[in-house]
Image (cartoon, helix red, strand yellow):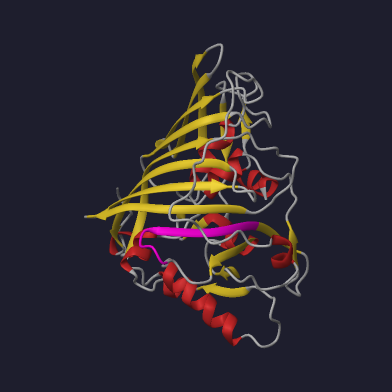
Amino acid sequence: MAKTLHKQINIQKIPEPDNTYTCSWHTDWAFGITNTGPQPSTAAAPLRGSTPPSQLTSHPNILKLHLEFLHPCTREISIITIKTLRSGATSTTLQAKLAQSNQLKILAIAKAVDFDRPLSPSARSEWSLLPPPNPTPNFKRVESGHKDSSWVTGRIKGEFLQFTERMLVLAPRQGHKTDGVHDGWYKFIYRRNEDEHYSPDWECGVNNTLLTFLTDALPSMSDTLIRNDGAYDAHGIHGKMVKWEAADRQDEGRPVTIWDIIKEAMKAQVFNNTVTLDIEFKRRVDPEKGNGWFFIRTVAKMLEKGRIDLNVVICDENMELLVVTQQTVLVLEAGRKFSKGRKAAL
């Protein structure tokens, strides 16, 4: 999936001025006129190197990434400009500006280090998630078409945000019991043929650009807290998954299929606009290792007067910590986005 994502973002160097690049949009990530999910990935893609002039190497050495979303990105070519703010013995600070039609849309600051260079000793901690998640599923059994006692397997297909068709999702079988806490396991897949057979996507494995995308490829925690049973409400999605699985008498092991319909999405009561996103990478991932399962916990600390604060934790199959994020989101009335003749505004 990393290879597909980079191909669709399509970073291209511009001869003049120095350190300037173009990047594309793709219908897989667009909803209406808005370019949605990969906005952080688009801004982060040129920053995945460590120090100039290797800013576009394949080595994922970004330690921390801060993004300011100034305006919504639209379905047009973006221009990204990279600037080195500081280059030191142990770290490098980079700045990226993403613009469309001469308007600054995203400002990114990245701190890069050499993950292969030890600076001091390491030690294990007893950190754990609270409340504890369901037991880790047997991934081989899930992939071979068997039900898991703690997780429901599904796929989301539909008419918008079509990247979800390339993901297997495991949702807690008993549902999301703690208000403001959402758990899920995710794996990228690809279509082998029209008979709906799927296999793991080993396209270039995983890198920081893909992990950056995952931090923003989340259910709507505002819809989930409100419990509006909309297209983005995790409780509503879970209910559909359990109902579909219970009614399936043909093939016990096949994933539940949930359909996203634009007509239903247009009934949304609210929409979310990310204002700031801070991402910290805890480990250097090996892009040649392949694509496994990712556990993602999303915690909404509050939903107050149109503001919501989110914490996201991403772990690998062994529950080793990969990424932690903090995100501030404005939750606005849907009419501001979908009313005729009006543009989304922050």
As drawn, 236 above or below 27:
below
Residue most extreme to the left: 305
x 73%, y 66%: residue: 141
Residue 212 point in image, percent of width and height: 54, 43
As drawn, 146 above or below 123:
below
Residue most extreme to the front: 126
x 33%, y 55%: residue: 343
As drawn, 332 above or below 290:
below
Residue 57 point in image, percent of width and height: 67, 28
Is residue 12 visible to the viewer in this orientation of the structure?
yes
The residue range painted magenta reads: 177-187
> Is 30 on the left-hand or right-hand side of 310?
right
As drawn, 13 above or below 333:
above
Which picture quadrant has residue 68?
top left
Decide which of 32, 228 is in the foreground and name it: 228
Please tell me whether the stretch drawn in magenta is mainly helix, strand or loop. strand
Residue 178 point in image, percent of width and height: 38, 63
Residue 211 point in image, percent of width and height: 57, 44
Is residue 36 visible to the viewer in this orientation of the structure?
no
x 31%, y 66%: residue: 226
Total residue callouts: 0
Magenta residue check for 294? no
Decide which of 11, 169 is in the foreground and name it: 169
Which picture quadrant has residue 276?
top left
Magenta residue check for 179? yes
Decide which of 197, 123 is in the foreground and name it: 123
